[in-house]
Amino acid sequence: MSSDIAPVLEKAVAGERLTPADGLKLMESHDLISLGQAADAVARRLHPEPFRTYNIDRNINYTNACTAVCDFCAFYRPPKHEEVYVLPREVLLKKIEETVALGGDQILMQGGLHPTLKLEWYEDLLRDIKQHFPQVNVHGFSPPEIYHFTKVNKLPLREVLSRLKEAGLGSLPGGGGEILVDRVRHEITRGKVLTDDWLNVCRVWHELGGKSSATMMFGHVETLAERIEHFERVRQLQDETGGISAFISWTFQPENTALSHIAPVGAFEYLKTQAISRLYLDNIPNIQSSWVTQGEKTGQVALFFGANDMGSLMIEENVVSSAGTVHHLTIDSIRRCIREAGYIPRQRNVFYEYIDEYDESAEPQVA
């Protein structure tokens, strides 16, 4: 173990909380193997079970119209663009039907910041989904969307979230976090929620009894210290509410974006940052691999760098693929990746509860 970061890693492995200075020291290190070993030790302490998990869902982008301008996004279209769409209800329900047929129990539903859709439209959509598919969890509407709803409808945040929850919203994805530092947000986006309000959407949702994930997109204009500041803000929120079920980080995909001049960071930086997230976010139970941006092999290696979950089958994905990054895995390949890493694959829901029927005799024994 590299001597300069060994004391920090020993703290984390022992369950002691890292400081921002500790986190920055790790970010500045290039000792990937030591970082990975420590993150793996923490993951095994938090998850001593012989399982590693995955889920089956579909990312449904109900609209690509967006009033925000994000330099990193290749998916959105300005509201009056000729390629703007809002999915017809029957098309959206058909997508959910196909997801259920493939064993899915959840949809991840997100869109752009549509300028005219009212809260009643979203409530009707949620009720329609619940009427047709009561067993499906709607993991929907990122914090930027929720904050946008409050502005379009001129309603308090708590009322918006309460009404969506009553209509059938099951959990909140942590999308649109990018880097939770206002300097970065001002530089790469216009017309989108800033850090405090992003966090407050999650806070109020947690106060209403809801669960959410948290995310980070890195490798663009942020500094290493700002990655740690992002971790720190997320950790503080989790200390306050306990409502974050998982953390997912991924690398910025520059192709077809206004930031295409920025060279993409690779697997080294991805694995390093994920490992540090596991060491720093001591109060968040689950870390999810991002094979969607990294591909099968790095997604699998991430299971040795702090991740205890392989993420989703992702039946449909439109945002990352718009930036030219397209990786596809089947259920069999996800399960194989987990087995090859020495674990037993289990299907879970968004709350990290096992939902498959497990036959211990059918699985190889794990040392």
Image (cartoon, helix red, strand yellow):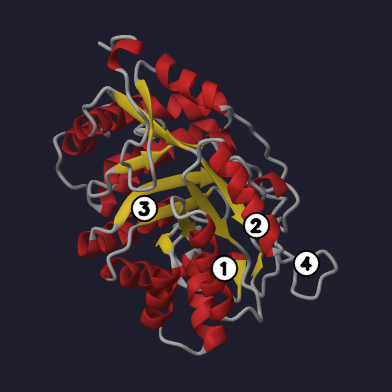
**Camera-side residue of 349 and 182:** 349
Sequence order check, earlier mark of 1 and 2: 2
Residue 328 x %, y %: 63, 31
Q: Secondary structure at mark 3?
A: helix
Q: Residues within 10 Å of mark 1 (few under 14, many from 20)?
A: some
**Camera-side residue of 218 and 112:** 112
Sequence order check, earlier mark of 2 and 3: 2
Give the residue drawn at x 42%, y 41%: 273
Q: In the rendered image, which residue does mark 1 sit on?
A: 125
Q: Is residue 331 above or below residue 237?
A: above
Residue 320 x %, y %: 64, 47
Sequence order check, earlier mark of 3 and 4: 4
Sequence order check, earlier mark of 4 and 1: 4
Nearer mark to the viewer, of 4 and 1: 1
Give the residue drawn at x 52%, y 51%: 107
Q: Secondary structure at mark 4?
A: loop
Q: In the rendered image, which residue does mark 4 sit on?
A: 84
As drawn, is 36 to the left or to the right of 293? Answer: left
* Distance (Cα) linking label 3 and label 1: 38 Å
For the question of whether residue 251 can be seen, the reply is yes
* Distance (Cα) linking label 4 and label 2: 16 Å
Name the residue type under label 4: Val
Nearer mark to the viewer, of 3 and 1: 1
Q: In the rendered image, which residue does mark 2 sit on?
A: 92
Q: Secondary structure at mark 1?
A: helix
Q: In the rendered image, which residue does mark 3 sit on?
A: 228
Name the residue type under label 1: Leu
Q: Is residue 298 above or below residue 226?
A: above
Nearer mark to the viewer, of 3 and 4: 4
